[in-house]
Image: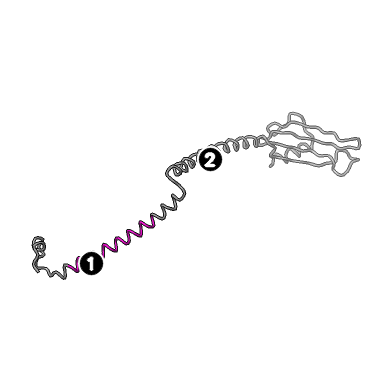
Amino acid sequence: MNSNILNSIGLGTMDPAIFIIILLVICIALLVYIIIVNKKLNKLSKTYDRFMRGKDAESLEDVILQRFEDIDKLIANDRDKDAKLKRIFDNLQIAVQKVGIVKYDAFNEMGGKLSFALAMLDKENNGYVINAMHSREGCYTYIKEIIKGESYIPLGTEEKEALNSALEK
């Protein structure tokens, strides 16, 4: 078989059966390629359908805008929590953090160690020493201010012990 088209491209002497086999292999390769691309397209289409289920273009835009608003609220909430945490930390600096207590008998005729000296200090060692002396006639309570771990009023023995116990913590 002699063909002008095959002669013009230099394949005029080629056996037509070989030419048909080559074309058949190319067709099979293209068919396999089309099947693979079609599977990928179906997978992408299913993913898109799942993403867009119940949503149109406007509702999708609303969803995205809502997410941005949610993020802004979370950022504002985080800032608010940071401010509250700072206030709590600042308040904690002046809260009682160190305590020392010494129980004792204020008077020889009394037993049971009903009297006590209580030292309560903050982080900077500022606070109070409370001395409660119990007797048969009543209970007498005294308070002395502590500034930077020292009292400007003389402390009794038990008060000093309570203060030192609190300072060691």
Q: Which residue is farthest top?
A: 152
Does the stretch in magenta take in 26?
yes
Which residue has dot 2 on it? 74
Relative placement, left or right, of 50 versus 31 is: right
The type of residue carrying mark 1 is Val
Circle 2 SS class: helix
Q: Nearer the viewer, residue 126 or 65?
A: 65
* Residue at x 88%, y 38% (from the top left corner): 107
* 33 sits left or right of 60 in the view: left
Magenta segment includes 103: no
Residue 54 x %, y %: 47, 49
Name the residue type under label 2: Leu
Q: Position of residue 81 (x, y in %)?
A: 58, 38
90 or 39: which is nearer to us?
39
By secondary structure, the bulk of the magenta-drawn segment is best described as helix
- Which-is-in-front pick, marks 2 and 1? 1
Q: CA distance from mark 2 to mark 1?
A: 61 Å
x and y, in percent, of residue 120 in the image: 73, 37
Q: Quadrant of the N terminus?
A: bottom left
Q: Toward which corner of the image does residue 162 lie, by quadrant? A: top right
Residue pictured at 22% horizontal, 64% vertical: 26
**Residue 121, percent from left and from top:** 70, 36
Q: Nearer the viewer, residue 40 or 165?
A: 40
The dot on residue 25 is: 1
